[in-house]
Amino acid sequence: MKEKYIKARELRHNTTPQEQKLWNLLKNRQFKGIKFVRQYPIGSYIVDFACRKEKVIIEIDGGQHKIDSNIIYDNKRTEYLNSRGYKVYRFWNNEIDANIEGVYEKLLSIFNLL
């Protein structure tokens, strides 16, 4: 179990540009008091971003997530997270890069803040 927290800490220190860009939107409760954590362990998985109170997970996916074996893994992972009461939302790296405003609006709608 401790290894998962060590890995999560390592991931927090080695974020992708897209994770950093999204984190800048999510941190400091910029969503009207909704708090997010990043690289958060849930069971045997580490999720990119989680709002524990609202049971929402946000994942950022790169091209490797289009490979069949990764699609199967992601589906299994999502099923597990859903079984724990979490709702998983996924954004592609290119969405973060090219349309961060659209991602922001989608997140506002997820939390009924529009």
Image (cartoon, helix red, strand yellow):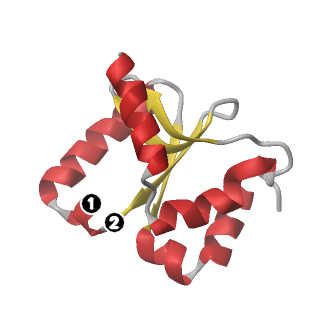
Q: Position of residue 42 (x, y in %)?
A: 44, 27
**Which residue does the image show at 77% across and 42% down from the upper left?**
34
Question: What amino acid type is highlighted by mark number 1?
Answer: His
The answer for how far apart the CA atoms under marks 1 and 2 are is: 6 Å
Q: Position of residue 82 (x, y in %)?
A: 45, 33
Task: Tell me the quarter of the picture where residue 43 sits.
Answer: top left
Against 18, residue 50 (above or below) is above
SS for callout 1? helix
**Which residue does the image show at 33% across and 66% down from the upper left?**
62
CB atoms at circles 1 and 2 under 8 Å apart? yes
Question: What amino acid type is highlighted by mark number 2?
Answer: Gly
Q: How many marks?
A: 2
User: In what quadrant of the picture does the C terminus appear?
Assistant: bottom right
Numbered circle sitting on residue 62:
2
Name the residue tied to disc 1.
Answer: 65
Numbered circle sitting on residue 91:
none
Furthest-top residue in view?
A: 1
